[in-house]
Amino acid sequence: MPAAEPTPSDEVLLARYLDTEVDRADREAAFHALVDRYHRRVFAVCLPVLGSVSDAEDATQETFLKLARNAASFRGDAKLSTWLYRVARNVCTDHVRHDARRPSTPVAEVGDLDAAPVEPDASPGTDAAVSVRWALEQLDPVSRRLLVLVAVEGLSYADAAAASDLATGTVKSRVSRARARLAQLLHDATATDERTSHP
């Protein structure tokens, strides 16, 4: 059985994409390999900032569009992942500034929303998911975003630091404190539920 080929590094893929001597299909395949490798992580950087899945997806696409257009300007001073996270952060900042200048239009009146029927969700794990979501919302926004990047999306402390423009040591301490706080909130919530259900 032949040995599997080693996964090409970011630098190899980027060089292949930029090499005009390489067949166009191979260049496109190299670029798509980079997108596949980093799409989820870039999306994870954008979502906590923009708060909307569709906006985060738009920002993610824009980030990779900037990579396609500006790949030749990447000098390799930092890792490609770090460069991508910075681009993503800048894209999100531009989106936030644009939205701040745009007048908001109400989508629906509160009365319309109140009239909509709400069916209880009886799927397994729903209570736990709601508890975790509630506990996450009790954290400050920076700690919540860092915890999601590291614990949920699997970014390294260094990558989360690059995505947030913070020192790696700061990220480690914020994530550690956020984990401890989250555990305490979930413990307290469980204890309260038990006391309520067993008077």
Image (spheres, helix red, strand yellow):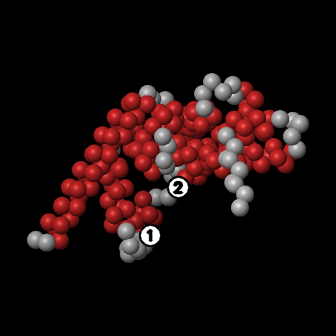
The picture quadrant where one finds residue 92 is top right
The percent coordinates of residue 199 (x first, y second) are 10, 71
Instruction: Look at 73% across and 48% down and name the residue there.
Output: 32
**In the rendering, at what x and y percent does residue 84 appear?**
61, 36
Residue 94 visible in the picture: no
Estimate the x, y position of residue 5 in percent, counting from the top left: 71, 50
Q: Residue at x 37, y 56 (%)?
A: 133
**Residue 75 screen position, x and y as percent:** 69, 25
Q: Picture quarter containing residue 124?
A: bottom left
Q: Is residue 190 above or below residue 91?
A: below
- Judged left or right of residue 12, residue 165 is left
Mark identifier at residue 107: 2
In the rendered structure, which amino acid carries the disc numbered 1? Ala
Q: Nearer the viewer, residue 70 or 130?
A: 70
What is the distance, in whole Å, between disc 1 and disc 2 at their CAs?
14 Å
For residue 72, what is the image quadrant? top right
Q: Work out whether residue 54 can be spotted.
A: yes
Left or right placement of residue 196 versus residue 98 in this view: left
Please indicate whether residue 126 sits to the left or right of residue 53 in the image. Answer: left
Give the residue displayed 81% in from the left and 43% down from the top: 27
Q: Which mark is residue 116?
A: 1
Secondary structure at numbered mark 1 = loop
Q: How many C-alpha atoms fall within 10 Å of the one at disc 1: few (<14), some, or many (≥20)?
A: few
Q: Secondary structure at mark 2?
A: loop
Amino acid of disc 2: Val
- Which of the two residues, 62 or 170, is positioned nearer the viewer here? 170
Q: Residues within 10 Å of mark 2 (few under 14, many from 20)?
A: few
180 or 110, which is in the foreground? 180
